[in-house]
Structure formats: structure tokens, C-alpha cells
Image (spheres, rainbow, N blue to C red):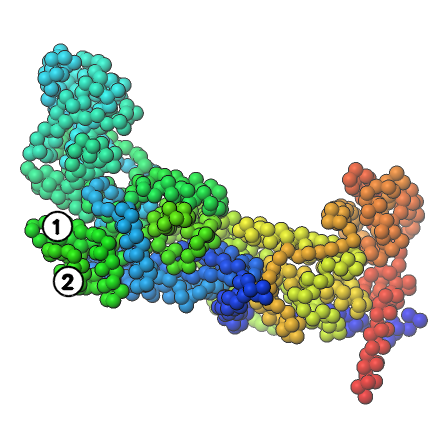
Amino acid sequence: MVAPTRLLRASWSSTLRLPKSSFPARPSPAANAEYLRRCTDELYTWQQSSRSTPDADGQLPEAFTLHDGPPYANGPLHIGHALNKITKDIICRFQVGQGKKVSYIPGWDCHGLPIEIKALQAQKKDANTDPVSVREAARELATKTVEEQKKGFKEWAVMGDWDNAYKTMQPAFEIRQLDVFKRMFEKGLIYRQFKPVYWSPSSRTALAEAELEYDENHRSLAAFVRFPVELSELLKKDTLSGLQGPLNIAIWTTTPWTLPANKAIAVHRDMQYSVVQDAEKGNELTLVASSRVAYYQDVLGRDLKEVLASVAGSDLAGNLTYENPFQRANGRQTVIHADFVSDASGTGLVHMAPGHGMDDYHVCSALDIQAFAPIDDAGAFTKEAFPEQPEVLEGMLVGNKGEKSATKAVTNYLEIQDLLRATQTYRHKYPIDWRTKQPVVVRATEQWFAGVDKIKDHAMEAMESVEFIPEAGRARLESFIQGRSQWCISRQRAWGVPIPALYRVDEGRYEATMDSKVIQNAIEVIKEHGTDAWWTDAPDDAKWVPKHLSGSYVRGRDTMDVWFDSGTSWTLLPSKRDQPVADVYLEGTDQHRGWFQSSLLTHVAAQSIEALGAKAPYKTLVTHGFTLDSDGRKMSKSLGNVISPSQITSGELLPPLKRKKQKGAKKEQGKDITPAYDAMGSDALRLWVASSDYTKDVTIGQPVLQAVNQALHKYRVTLKWLLGIFSLPSTQPAFTSFDKLRITYPMDPAHSALYTDKLALHRLSQVSKEVHEYYAKYEFYKGVNAINKFINLDLSAFYFETLKDRIYTGTEADCQHLQNILGVIFYELLQMLSPISPLLVEEAWDHVPQQLRESSVHPARAHWLPLQFKAHESPMLLDKYVLYVDRLGSAIKTAQERLRTEKKLGSGLECDVVLGIPEDSMGSAFATEFLNPVYGNEGQELSSLFVVSGFEISIVSDVEKKIEALAMEKDAWWAEERLSIIGNEFRVLVHRPTNHKCPRCWRFVATYEGDLCTRCHDVVQVAEGSESATAVSST
């Protein structure tokens, strides 16, 4: 009955169900804008709107807030921006998938020196430009940059409330910032003080510790300088009574330029000192620490004679005086004690300049020794540096190593005066301005400070309830808080929020005045006239002076530290009585000293701690590393290794695509052909971010990007094939909704009777749970790895191979059953990929058959929980099945590969398999759990599972007989493989098929050559009968 069918059909391809889809191999630029709109603005608006109404129980959906740390609005986007913004977006998208109402308001830090400098450079103006012009130029640059950066962020599919993005230069933001300042002032946390601060001559402003970096290999010219001293009567009569001739003390300093500001020399009371004699200097007597005599001799390059040993530092402190050669008019100065003096370096005597050193300042202040710093804003000596001979030092620059070097000017003068004993180049760690990368100095000036000491304990308490990712971030932030006593918040720049201080200028004084009424009055005036009025109004404009003040006043010109600006951005968020205002803060690791710290300090300072306790503004603090090239180097223009995000989206960092040769096309000589690249769009950039362990420094280069593009192509190929399955003309899916199918179908054990389906759904549920857990812990790279392995190993290499025959050539019922299972897989893949590759998901969803798409919930909008799957077997037993299939499949493939090498075998369907079981292993777990349920039907189920034409289970002795029989056949071939499963040995025999090849399904299961197999015959007959019935009814 079957044989005649062969005569009626030359090809069976028309009877096959071959999937086709219009889903393209690469993203379509023409459709990108629409997909982008749907998965960003439309999705964000939808979830904000739909999740603002109570449910049937009157409960509002849970809210989730990720507070954006504002990037500087001073330049084009770089790869670090991508790592930051896309990681934030992945978090927000995952939370949308958890049914939460997500709030993400992007922001920009618009004030500060980087913007001011760049704006002045663009307009070819210098730092002396009037403040109004500076502010106009800076505002124009910041406004333009914000729009440019916003456009780039949106192209990366970063969703958020872009229409209400905050900018620190907005009037409302500045008012809230000033209100926080007022609250801190009223708590006694804001004050003005003349004391040393870090000062950047290159930026001409004070800096806070958070604005410093360190040059580990800075070189300084260190100097050994002698000071002639006079002894007190007590020393002359007692400890140093035996000395013959005048005495000197020798100091060592790495900053000789600070010597004009010298106010004291310190010893340590518990150290021992010696008097040494220098024959080459006329038997000069010099006092140094006893333990440093040998070192001092090495420096001088000659031997010294020790004439007096073991003089206690306690005898010297307060009993020696000397003159500062640059400040003789100030009279004699005293040798004092300081706890920090040691004999670890130098001479054991320390030059003290309280105007240029924090430790010096604290010691001298306790002794009522005033700080003195005779340098100007540019780091140049003023005439006060050497009043007697101002021409020697005035104008010399402290950071200069050329002709105008302050250090050289000082040491040259000391050498002329025979006070310089030696110099040396000294390599050490030195602070630099993190913006200009130029050295900073310590300089005593009057500045405004926030007293961190008073809130430090509360800040530490607030951190206890914060989750840190990674946990190491906790110790890092704690160390910055603990190491800080005060925060210099004033900056000598025009582009920023003014510190609302008035200065009294009558009666010949310039005195700072600040109280709550002054601050509140400034706030009210700024509300009405704007911040610019602080600079544009006349200096003595009366509206800025509250009525309770008498006298003449002018407004100050200091602005607030930009970290105070961005640190108060939490005021944008609605307050929560018992919870932090934000669920997540996420920034780079450098923000432990910056935004993380300033946000914590301002939030704690502004709280009513007595009533509510100390709380941080964030529940979770996530830190990411820096971006490096593939060699682990920081990116810089000088190295030529800077990578732009657009280079990733365009694919131009990868080798050009090979062009397909056109038939009959002649090769054009000498014509430049523009190379085409594998452009995978923003999803390539996003997948690189998601694939990276952001808690460490992240590398990027061609090898990494090639892996990313390969993964994206695998996603697209997988989705394209699945979309084709749902669009089969001859077999429409039986289900009507993906989301309903996902909930119900995997929970009925009857739907997964076959091993292939059972294992596919089991592994899908496992991966779904893994990925969900990883996303919830913000370990996105682990989630992506799990997805990639699942697609490559479980789907492409296993499940899809096992079911292609059933879909293409099997019964309609079996095909629809598989469409159900594949529908669950497809929808789950889209839900897992939605946070990572939203454009890909949107594009794939757009290619779902319209009716099915319209009756299903969009995967990015559905509530995603780990997939639930129920089978007759326990999850533990299913895990064993996975192991059994892997071991047995590996043995079969090994034998097949050996036969392919011998040119015996092509496709896996060109063989039969016999599994030999030793009689003593018939009761093994593998046999009883895996083989017994299909015994007698293994030819159908296991042959399909391992994609072979036949499968037989037999005892080993029968396998041996089979091999003997094959050996007797003329054209027989076979390969044998042994395998061990849980301690039991088995044998696999792969041999030439027993039956003939079916011309329709290509399995070797037909009884006669050229005939259809029984299944194909039945399927074709049913299909042709259906076609005939349709034709009759249509007539």
C-alpha cells in the first residue's frame, strides 16, 4: 500500500513543516526608533501609570526607587557612562518585571570647576573673567551637554523620567540645597575658620579630601637646613654647659618653599639628641637626633665628630630659640615639642609651618602660634614671604620646577647665607588635583566648613543597616567617614550655588556674618530673582541684607563644593518615615569619597535624629569598577586606547564583514569600498555591560566584543527559529496566550511524558530560577552566563535537535504539543532577556503572529517569577536524568565521531544504537530509573532523544553476539564505546542502520528502499485527506 505513494511525489518538501520568519539576522535601523520608543518612554510611562492605582484589595504596588548619581555635564559620553547607566537600567527593568512601580529620575551635576574651565576655554576667556560672564558661559555649556548626553543615554535604551530629569543648576534644586545648608547651620555644623586646607593653584580654589588623587611617584627637592640657636640660661648652665662655640639645629624638609612660613621647630620630648662637629665647616656644632647621626653623615658625605650625646628632647623643648631668615622682623621663635616627630626620617627635628600643614597647625594652635601662608591663589609668593627683600621671592611659584621655582629661590638664598647643608631628590606620595592632575598645596585661608566630627557617629550608625554590593564597599566608605573631621565646603569659583554669607565692610573691617535670618533671606531673594542675582546685583544691594542687621554689608563670593550640590540630591525624593528615600544608589568606586559620602553626611545632618534615629538615604549601595582596555590599562588619549560606546554599537571594533560575491560582477579596480560591520546596535553595548562583573574593573576589547556579538547572534537565531515555529501555515498553535500558557502548561505532568520534553522544561525551570536569583542579587553577569549556557547547550545542542524531526515531519498533534512547550521557552527567554536586551525583545515580540501577540501580555510588562514545572518525577530524579542523558549521549557521539573519521557515517540518523547492560547491572539506578520506563519503546523515545534512527536495550552478552554477527557481514561497520554511570559499566554499540532511509524524514526506519516510513505515510495521508476535504468544501 505504501510503495505506490512513491510514484506520485518527486519531492516531499512540500509536506514538511519548515519554519520561516521575517525576523532579520541583524537589527533594522529603520525600525529601531519605534522599538526604542516602545521599550523606553512607553514602558516607563505605562508602569508609572498602571501601578499608581490600588488593586482589588486596596493595596498599591510596591515602589522601587533608584536614585541617579549625577554625571558631570562637561563632555561627550564615554564607556564608563555606559557601564554606569546601563547597569542602573538593568536593575530598573528587572524591578518592573517584579511588578513594582519604578522611579528613576536621571540627573546631571552642572556646577563646578570642570564645566567652568571648559566653558572658558570654549569662549577663549581666562579665569579672571567677570563672574557673570563665567556663569553665562558655564550654564550654556552645561545645558548643551545635558541634551547631548541625554540623547546618547536614550539611544542606549535607558528608560526613565527624562522629561523631569534634575539638574543641580535648576532653581528648585538650588533652593532645596540652600535649605539643607540652613538646617545644618542651625545645628551648629557650618562655621568659618582660618586654617590650612588643600589648595589647588591650578584651579585657584580650596579642595576637599574627596577631590584629591595621589601621585605615588612625585619627586620633590628635599633640603637640609641649619638654624643658629640661642640657648636658655638653664641649658647653658646644665645640659649643654660643656659646649664651646655657637650651636645650630638641622632640619629636613621636602617642601623648602614653606620655610618663609616657618613658625617653630619641633623635637620629641622622649627622643635623644646629639651634638656633632663638622670640621669642614669650621668645627660647626649641630644638633640632630642621636639615631640619625649616621644618616646625616651619609647625606653630607663626610664624617662628623660626636661631641655630646644623649641630650633629652624634653630638655631642648622650650629652651632653644632661633630666627627665621625670611622673617627676622618677627623676632626669635621657639623650639617646641610635637608628638608626631620621629626618627624614621630626616634629622629628628621638624620645621613647623602651621599655615602649610595640618599637623603643624594643630600643634601650633594649642600654643597660640598663628598660622601664616604668604602665597596667593595661583601659588605664587607674596611680598610677605620675605618682607626685607621682597624681590627675592615675590612671584615665585611653589609648584614650578623651572626658572620661577619657589623651591629653587628659597634654597638659592639659603645657600648664599650658608644655611643650606644639602639637598636631595625625594620620591614620595603627593596629593594632586583630581581634575587638573596638578600638585596641590596646603594653604591657610579663611574657608567655610561643615563639622563632620559632630555627626560622624550618627553616620556610622546609619551605615549599619545599608547593604553594600560588593561588601568591601562598607569598609571603604567607613574609612573615609572615620578619617574626616571637617569638610571644607567653600570654593573660590563663580559657577555654583553661593554660600549665603554677608560681610560687614564698615568701620574698616571685613567680617563674615551668617545666621538663620541671613540664610533664609537669601533663599527668599533667590526664589524671586534667581541665583544669578547674587552676582548681578550691586554689591551693597539692600534686599540681600535682613532688617535685623545694622551696618554696611556686601555679599560673599564663595560657592559651595559640588559634592554638597549633588550630595543634597536626595531632597528630590519623597520622604519615607521608616525607610531610606532610595532603594539603590549605584556609582563608581571613586564615589565612596565623593557622592556616597556627601549624600550620607548631608542626609544625616539634616535629620531629626533624636526622633527617628540616623538613617542613610540609601537602602543598598552598589559600586562598580573602572573600564580598562583588553590589556588591563586605563583608557587615555595619549595611549590611543579610548573606546567610544558608538564604536561598540556600530560594530566597527570587530573585523569587517566579508562581502558576498555577486554573480557576474566584475572586480572594480582601485575603488575604495566602505567596509560593512556587524552592527548589533545598543543591545551589543548593553550585553557587554550585563556580561561584565561590574564589582571589579571591567575590561573591553575585540575578544570580549566578539563574544558579545556571537551571543547576540545566537539569541537572534534562536528567536527567529522559534518565531517560525509559531508561524507555520499548516499548523497554527493551539494556545492563544503566551502568559497563560506559561502558567498552566508546565504544571500538568501529562504534557511532559517524553524524556525530551520533560528534561527541556526541567532545565528551563532551573535556569529561570537561577537567572531570577542572580538578577535579584544584581549579579547580572551570572544570569547572562546561565542564559548563554542554556541556549547553547540545552536548547541548540540538545532539545532543538531532538524535536526538529517531530515538528518538521511528525503528526499535527505532536507539532502543536511542541509549539506549546516552545511557547513556554520562548516567553521565558524574552522575560529573562528583557532587562538586558530590551530592543531585541521588542523586535522579537513585534514578529509574533498578531493575534497571538495581541492576546498575550508583553513579556517586559508581565510579572516575572521563576517558572514552575511539575512532572511525575521529583526534581532530584530529573537531575539524574540530565546526568544519564549527558553520559550516554557523550558515549554515542564519541563512537559516531570515530565512524565519521573513518568516512563511514555522516548524519547521526545514519546509525542505530544498542545499549548493552551487564546482567549484574540490571538493578542499577540507571537501569531501573531511566531505562525501565521506556523498555520496549526505546526505539521510538530514545532514538528521538539521541537523534539516531534506532535504539535497542540489550544485555552485554547479546551485544557481543551482535558484534560477531556484524563481523560476518560484508559491508557492516560499527564502533563500540564503554561508559560508567554511577559506578556501573555499560557498553554502547553504534552500527549501520537495519532499515532503509525514509525519503521524507530521512530516518532509516522504512521497511523498503524508497518507501515512506509508517509514520510519514500516515501523516501524509491525513494531510492529503484534509486537503481534499478542504477542496471539496470550497467548491
Q: Closer to the camera, 437 or 356?
A: 356
Residue at the spot x=8%, y=53% of the render?
A: 506
Give the percent coordinates (x, y) of residue 716.
61, 63
Q: Is residue 426 left or right of residue 806?
A: left
Vertical order, 808 against 589 (above or below)? below
Mark 1 crowd level (few <14, some 14–19, many ≥20, 10 Å Cα): few
Marker count (numbered): 2
Q: What's the residue at 64%, 60% (across, down)? A: 828
Q: As rendered, which of 275 and 968 lies closer to the eye?
A: 275
Question: Among all residues in the image, which is located at the extreme top?
Answer: 242
Q: Secondary structure at mark 2?
A: helix
Q: Which mark is residue 143?
A: none
Q: For the C terminus, which image quadrant?
A: bottom right
Q: Residue pushed farthest front?
A: 611
Where is mark 2, residue-wise?
542
Between tags 1 and 2, which lies in front? 2
Mark 2, other Cα within 10 Å: few <14 / some 14–19 / many ≥20: few
Percent from the top left, x then y, of residue 47? 52, 66
Q: Quadrant of residue 71?
A: bottom left
Residue 504: percent from left, percent from top: 13, 53
Quarter of the rendering containing residue 772: bottom right
Question: Residue 852, relative to residue 319: is it above or below?
Answer: below
Q: Residue 124: x and y, percent?
A: 23, 61
The amino acid type found where label 2 is placed reads Ala
Q: Residue shown at 15%/62% (left/top)?
A: 542
Q: Nearer the viewer, residue 584 or 959?
A: 584
Which callout, 1 or 2, points at the residue further toward the start of the chain? 1
Q: CA distance from mark 1 to mark 2?
A: 17 Å
In screen coordinates, is 568 left or right of 444? right
